Image (cartoon, rainbow, N blue to C red):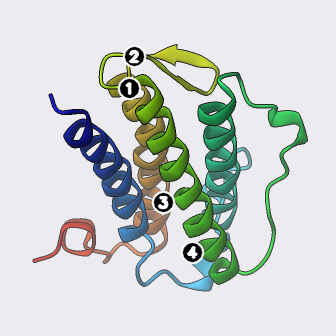
Amino acid sequence: MDPIVFEESALNALRHAREHFLRHLRGITEEQTEHKPCRDCKSIRETVAHLVVVDVAAAESLRKGQAPDFGRLEAPTGSLDELLRRLMESHASVLAAMAEALKKSGSHGDVCAFGEWCHPCEATSLLASEDYYHAGQVAAIRMATDPGWDYYRSVYGD
C-alpha cells in the first residue's frame, strides 16, 4: 500500500473513532454530565477529562517511543465545554504524533503506542479503542438517565 494512503487511512480511523465518541455527547444535560451509575464509574465529565489525559499520553508515547509517564499527567478540570476544547486540542496532537510516527516507520515499520511497539494497524486500533470503549460508557449513562433517548438515531442518524 502507498505509504501516503496508509497514513491517511490510519489518521481517518482515529478521526472516525473520536467523532463516534463525540456523537454520544450531543444533547446531554448537565445532570447527565455529572451522573455516576456506581461509585467506581466515571461521570461523563470525568470521562472527557480522562480522554484528554489518554491523548496526551498517546502523543507522548508516539513521539518518544516509550511508555508515557502517567504519574505526571493530571486530568484537566473545568466546564464540559472547556474540557471538550481541550479534547479537540489533545486529539489534534495525537493525529500529528501518529502522522510523524508513520512517516518515520513507513507502512511496514512499528510505532510505539502507550509503550508497546506494534504495527501501525495495531497501534491505530489500540488508540481508537479508547474512544469506542468510552462511547459505551457515555451511552450507558445516557440510557440510564433518559430511557427515551434513541441511541441509534442520536449516534447514527436517521
Q: Secondary structure at mark 2?
A: loop
The image position of residue 60, as x and y in percent, is 69, 39
* Residue occupied by mark 3: 138
| Residue 57 occupies quadrant | top right
Identify which amino acid the numbered label 3 is placed on.
Answer: Val
Depicted 140 relative to depicted 111: above or below: below
* Residue occupied by mark 4: 32
Depicted 125 relative to depicted 105: above or below: below
Measuring 66% from the left and 67% from the top, which residue is drawn there? 45
Identify which amino acid the numbered label 1 is placed on.
Answer: Pro
Viewed as shown, does residue 13 lie left or right of 135?
left
The image position of residue 152, as x and y in percent, is 20, 66
Depicted 49 relative to depicted 3: above or below: below
The label number, if any, that marks residue 109 in the structure image: 2
Measuring 39% from the left and 34% from the top, which residue is drawn there? 124
Identify which amino acid the numbered label 4 is placed on.
Answer: Gln
For disc 3, the neighbor class at 10 Å (few under 14, some 14 to 19, many from 20) is many
